[in-house]
Structures are given as C-alpha cells and as structure tokens.
Amino acid sequence: MRRPIYLDYNATTPHDPEVIEAMKPYLKEFFGNPSSANYFGTITRNAIDKARLQISLLLNCSPGEIVFTSGGTETNNLAIKGIALANKHRGNHIITSAVEHPAVLEVCRDLEKNGFKITCLPVNNIGIIEINEVEKAVRGNTILITVMHANNETGAIQPITGISAIAGSGNIFLHTDAAQSIGKIPVDVEELGIDLLSVAGHKLYAPKGIGALYIKKGTSLNKVILGAGQEKGIRPGTENILGIVGLGKACEIANRDFLKNHEHLINLRNMMYNGLKENLQENLQLNGDLDQILPNTLNLSFKGITSNEMIAALNDKVVLSAGAACHSGITKISEVLQAMNIPEEWAKGAVRISVGRFTTEQEVGRAIGHIVEAFQKLRK
C-alpha cells in the first residue's frame, strides 16, 4: 500500500538522514554527562560546543549567544517571561500580535493575570502587521515586543526589521519566534535587529524535544526553570545531547543548502498553487499574498466545503492540515483567519499545504489530482 503524500511540513519535519547519522554515536557510545570533568563528559561537552557554533553560523551570531532548551514552546516562555520579569521595574507593557502561536499568546495571557498589560496588534487581510499599528501601540512603559517572523498557518512574513527600528528607538526588547522561517528564508539576527529569537528543532529536520534561544549579548533575563548552572545558568538541567547534536547538524545543512532548498520549495509551492487554481478557478482562494509568504506554504480555501470534509476525503492519499476545527458538527474558524477578516464561507474551507525538502514534483502532481478529485466529489 502506497503511503500518503506528506504535505504538512509546517507541523513537523522528518529527520534528515545526515542528522540521524550525526546523532548515532551519541545514542550508542557517547553517553557522558557534559557537566562531568572526565573523558566521557568532555566528548559530550565538545559536541554541545560544536552544535552551538553550527547554529550561530546560520543565525550570524556568537556561539555564546545560544542557549539550548527543550523546544519552541519552552524557548518562547523563557524569552517572554524572562524579559518581562527581569524588566518589570522599567514597565509592564508588552506588545504582541493576534496571529501568534499559542506558545506566545498563552504566555502573554498568563503575564496579564500577573499585572502586565498586553496589546495585541491586528493584521491586514493578508495576515501582516502594519508598521503604523506598532508605532501607535508603543507606550512609555513598553518593555517588550514579541512578533513571529513567519506565521505557521498562512506563512505570512512579518516586517521584523521595521518593527526593530521602532523597538530600538524606544529602548524596547524585541523577540521573534522564528520556528517556521529558519531554513526557508534568510534569518540573520544582525539584519533583523532583534534581541531574542526562538528556534524549534522539529521544524528544521531535527528531533522533537530540542530548541534554542538566541539572546543578544548584554541582554539579561530571569530564568523560568530553577536548578543547577547548565547553559550559563539560564536554562538548568542536564543537556539533551542527542537533540543538541541533531539540531546543530540540521542548522549546518540549512546553511549549506539554503539556496538549493529555497528554490526547490518555491518551485513546488507554485506548482501546487497553479495546478489547483487552473482546475478549481473561482472555487479556490489563497489566504495571503504569494510574494509575502514562506516559500513552502499555502493557506487555501475551498468554496462550499469545510476543511474537515476535505481532510477526510483525502484520507490516506494526501496529508494536510485543517484551517478550521470541527467538533460535534460545529466548525470553528482559525483565529488567524479571523484576524485576517477572511469571510466565514471561505475560512471554514481553509487548509494548509506545506511542502518540504523531501517533497518531489511527482508527489505534488499526484496531490493536485487527489485534491481536485476530492473537491469535485464533495461538491456533488
């Protein structure tokens, strides 16, 4: 039986074979605790140092500005809570956006319960924040702006460099969740002008359960996990050597093969969109702007059906993500699409298609046929 075509790379990525090979020695023989001053500990400590360098070369920062975590969620918690708690003497206002991942929005909501004030910026109809909205939101007591680099549902790329100029002029810290953008578009912390950046390994062909936080030199933040002195005391706990090695190798590959992979993703995404549009025409709507989204991502609405119907019709043929959740016969529209003011008739039929490094043109061609066939059957 042929496996379904996997087009959900924004949810998670398979492990790159090179990443698996890099991790194998640390699964089999190099098991030492990197905090131990012995032969085995030295080997794993050196492996951590190498991974830190590999990540820093991708992000254009110093290895000493990288702190390892358990993944994107913890990284966002550490960045946002860490800055908020360390700077509450300066102010209690935080700016974020309506289209952030729950790992950002839930942290902000929790801080709001503890005396912080949160401003949630709107987005336009293609999912992008207008710079003037950021300017209007800044107050004298604003200490942090946290805006994702690219959206996980629509792929919309936010104007981080423009936001950085506003943050810098107001002495405001700027954090960006770059889980979806790394390896797909350039992510240079110097060019972006940010203070903190979140990395999630499993979005980058590395294992789940590993992440990293870039912290600009001179930026102080409170720890959110208490313990010993690992990771400069910012993130205590015995390091996940296997995951760290995998993430380091994944970043090395992303840096080495960036141009090839970027071209591959754009080609497949455009092939998918053009193929579906040619067949479905006015029954298909792109939620976003092709020139301002990730090269691998399409958020598409199908007229007259729900996303869950499409997912079910494709079943074991094509794996996509639904843009709306359906429980007990009630369709719940994505909060991201609501923020974009996508009409309900279109929003309820939205799906996310995200191609990846291992997707082939043949798979995209077959997927187009399956999706068109599923739509036509559903409309009948």
Image (cartoon, rainbow, N blue to C red):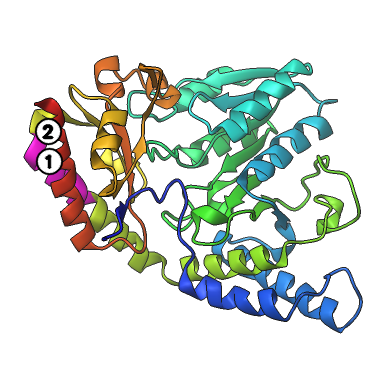
In terms of image quadrants, where is residue 78?
Answer: top right
x and y percentages locating residue 225 in the rendered image = 83, 43
Q: How many neighbours does mark 2 have within 10 angstroms: few (below 14), some (14-19), or many (20 or more)?
A: few
Above or below, 342 relative to 197: above
Above or below, 25 relative to 128: below
Determine the residue located farthest toward the bottom in the rendered image. 39
Magenta stretch: dominant SS? helix
Q: Alpha-carbon distance for marks 1 and 2?
A: 6 Å
Seen at 13% across and 48% down, the residue is 369
In terms of image quadrants, where is residue 363?
Answer: bottom left
Which disc is residue 116 wearing? Answer: none
Q: Is residue 354 magenta?
A: no
Amino acid type indicated by mark 2: Lys
Q: Are marks 1 and 2 in contact (CB under 8 Å)?
A: yes
x and y percentages locating residue 319 in the rendered image = 33, 47
Above or below, 375 relative to 246: above
Q: Nearer the viewer, residue 47 or 351?
A: 351
State which region is magenta: 270-280
Amino acid type indicated by mark 1: Glu
Seen at 27% across and 25% down, the residue is 306
* Residue at the spot of label 2: 377
Q: Is residue 324 rendered to the left or right of residue 318? A: right
x and y percentages locating residue 224 in the rendered image = 81, 39
Q: Is residue 380 rendered to the left or right of residue 293? A: left
Name the secondary structure under disc 1. helix
Q: Is residue 72 rendered to the left or right of residue 256? A: right
Res 288 visible: no
x and y percentages locating residue 323 in the rendered image = 36, 30
* Residue at the spot of label 1: 373
Q: Is residue 273 magenta?
A: yes
Res 323 visible: yes
Name the secondary structure under disc 2. helix
